[in-house]
Image: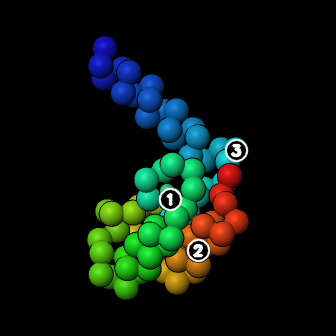
């Protein structure tokens, strides 16, 4: 039963991730906003100073690396919001 609950939870997350709302690039902790520290972390990942595992949300296209334009997108999200 615990597994079922987890799967249902995961399904909700997956549905939320890719349907209506815009992806929040750089929202490392998934709280709906990008703060300066998250933009900085995205930059650090792009510079290979931090592992991507610390902020998978910074990898907008999911290719396993964070590029300058993804850091830029995170920066925009921090200024303009992402919902
Ligand atoms: Ca956040
Ligand atoms: Ca990427």
Dot 1 surroundings within 10 Å: few (below 14), some, or many (20 or more)?
many
Residue corresponding to mark 2: 75
Residue 27 marker: 1
Q: Earlier in the sequence, mark 3 or mark 2?
A: 3
Q: Residues within 10 Å of mark 2 (few under 14, many from 20)?
A: many
* Mark nearer the viewer, 3 or 1: 1
Query: How many numbered markers are drawn?
Result: 3
Q: Nearer the viewer, residue 11 or 75?
A: 75
Q: Quadrant of residue 79?
A: bottom right
**Horizontal side of residue 38 vs 50, given as left or right:** right
- Which residue is found at the position 29% from the left and 71% from the top? 51
Side of 63 where 6 appears, left or right:
left
Considering every residue shown, the one lying at the far front of the view is 36
Place of residue 38 in the rendered image (x, y in percent of width and height, measured from the top left): 46, 67
At 51% across and 49% down in the image, what residue appears? 31
Pinpoint residue 37: horizontal percent, then vertical percent.
Answer: 44, 69
Mark pair 2, 1: CA separation:
10 Å
- Rounded to the nearest whole Å, what is the CA distance between mark 3 and mark 2? 22 Å
Residue 28: tell me if it is visible.
yes
**Residue 33 to residue 69: above or below:** above
Tag 3 near tag 1, CB within 8 Å: no
N-term-proximal mark, 2 vs 1 = 1
Q: Secondary structure at mark 1?
A: loop
Q: Give the Cα distance between marks 3 and 1.
A: 17 Å
Residue holding disc 3: 20
Queried on whether the Cβ of the residue with tag 2 lies below 8 angstroms from ligand 1, the answer reads no
Which image quarter is the N terminus in?
Answer: top left
Residue 1, above or below 66: above
Task: Determine whether, in the image, residue 53 is placed left or right of residue 20.
Answer: left
Residue at x-position 67% and y-position 60%: 81
**Which residue appears at 60% of the width and 67% of the height?**
78
């Amino acid at each position: 039963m615990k597994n079922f609950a987890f799967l249902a939870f995961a399904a909700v997350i997956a549905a939320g991730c890719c349907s209506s709302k815009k992806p929040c690039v750089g929202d490392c902790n998934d709280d709906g906003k990008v703060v300066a520290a998250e933009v900085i972390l995205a930059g650090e990942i792009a510079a290979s100073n931090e592992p991507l595992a610390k902020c998978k949300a910074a990898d907008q296209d999911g290719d396993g690396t964070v590029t300058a334009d993804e850091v830029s997108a995170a920066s925009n999200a921090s200024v303009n919001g992402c919902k």
